[in-house]
């Protein structure tokens, strides 16, 4: 009996010690100045590309394991890089207008991670999360790869979104007939690079 009590006591102490040394869940703030989001949209006659800035965000870890996070996109920061001068200004103005993202009323877009699954190799994960643009929220899935750059942690991902999921229908052949070469395709790409302190 005495030996059993000692063994149970030893297990309890060992369990407490293991719990005490478990790495705590940590939130790492995203450096919005170093992070970057590149957008690319397509139409029958070509494509346009540009940047949009992040307003805030964080990545969550349980020890070394990536577990979640979120970020806020500053929709008022939309820029165009494939056009110059007046033409760039007209495109950006149109994207910010109620025809597209109506940034005066909806200045932010948000993404919140709901599930993270390891892809079986270090730093590689499959992510599911809710993207909210304007008043509409849609679940999206994509892969994330972690790395290091200049002593900082990086997370990169390529995301494909359907703008009509967020009630952005201008020039969409899915909703309007007879657009011809003025058709703007529904899907657009985001190339995301998040930078956070290690």
Image (cartoon, helix red, strand yellow):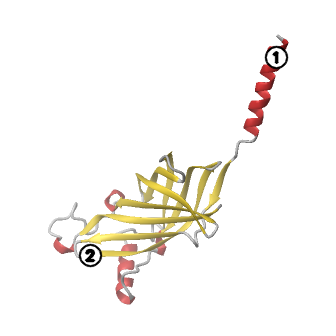
Q: Quadrant of the N terminus?
A: top right
Task: Name which quarter of the figure residue 149 lies in.
Answer: bottom right
Which residue is pictured at 37% across the width and 60% down the height? 160
Question: Mark number for residue 46?
Answer: 2
Crowdedness near tag 2: few (<14), some (14–19) or many (≥20) residues, C-alpha within 10 Å: few
Which residue is pictured at 43% across the width and 66% down the height? 191
- Element type at mark 1: helix
Question: Mark number for residue 84?
Answer: none
- Element type at mark 2: strand
Left or right side of 80 for 29: right
Q: Residue furthest right?
A: 2
Q: Is residue 109 above or below residue 38?
A: above
Which residue is pictured at 42% across the width and 54% down the height? 142
Visible residue check, residue 99: no
Task: Name which quarter of the figure residue 154 lies in.
Answer: bottom right
Contact flag, marks 1 and 2 (Cβ < 8 Å): no
**Viewer-nearest of discs 1 and 2:** 1
Q: Nearer the viewer, residue 14 or 91?
A: 14
Q: Nearer the viewer, residue 19 or 30?
A: 19
* Image x and y of residue 47, in percent: 30, 74
Q: Quadrant of the C terminus?
A: bottom right
Q: Nearer the viewer, residue 130 or 105?
A: 130
Crowdedness near tag 1: few (<14), some (14–19) or many (≥20) residues, C-alpha within 10 Å: few
* Image x and y of residue 177, in percent: 16, 65
Is tag 1's residue or tag 2's residue first in the polypeptide sequence?
A: 1
Q: CA distance from mark 1 to mark 2?
A: 76 Å
Residue that label 1 marks = 5
* Image x and y of residue 179, in percent: 18, 70
Q: Is residue 80 above or below residue 22?
A: below
* Image x and y of residue 153, in percent: 60, 62
């Amino acid at each position: 009996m005495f030996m059993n009590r000692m063994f149970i006591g030893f297990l309890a102490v060992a369990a407490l010690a293991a719990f005490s040394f478990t790495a705590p869940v940590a939130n790492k703030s995203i450096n919005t100045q170093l992070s970057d989001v590149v957008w690319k949209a397509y139409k029958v006659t070509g494509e346009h590309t540009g940047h949009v800035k992040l307003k805030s965000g964080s990545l969550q870890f349980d020890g070394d394991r990536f577990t979640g996070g979120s970020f806020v996109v500053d929709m008022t920061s939309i820029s165009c890089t494939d056009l110059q001068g007046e033409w760039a200004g007209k495109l950006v103005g149109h994207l910010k207008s109620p025809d597209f993202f109506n940034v005066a009323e909806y200045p932010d877009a948000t993404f919140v991670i709901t599930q993270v699954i390891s892809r079986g190799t270090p730093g590689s994960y499959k992510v599911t999360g809710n993207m909210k643009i304007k008043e509409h929220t849609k679940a999206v899935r994509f892969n994330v790869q972690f790395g290091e750059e200049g002593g900082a942690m990086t997370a990169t991902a390529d995301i494909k979104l359907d703008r009509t999921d967020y009630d952005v229908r201008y020039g969409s052949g899915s909703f309007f007939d007879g657009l011809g070469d003025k058709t703007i395709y529904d899907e657009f790409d985001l190339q995301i690079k998040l930078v956070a302190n290690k």
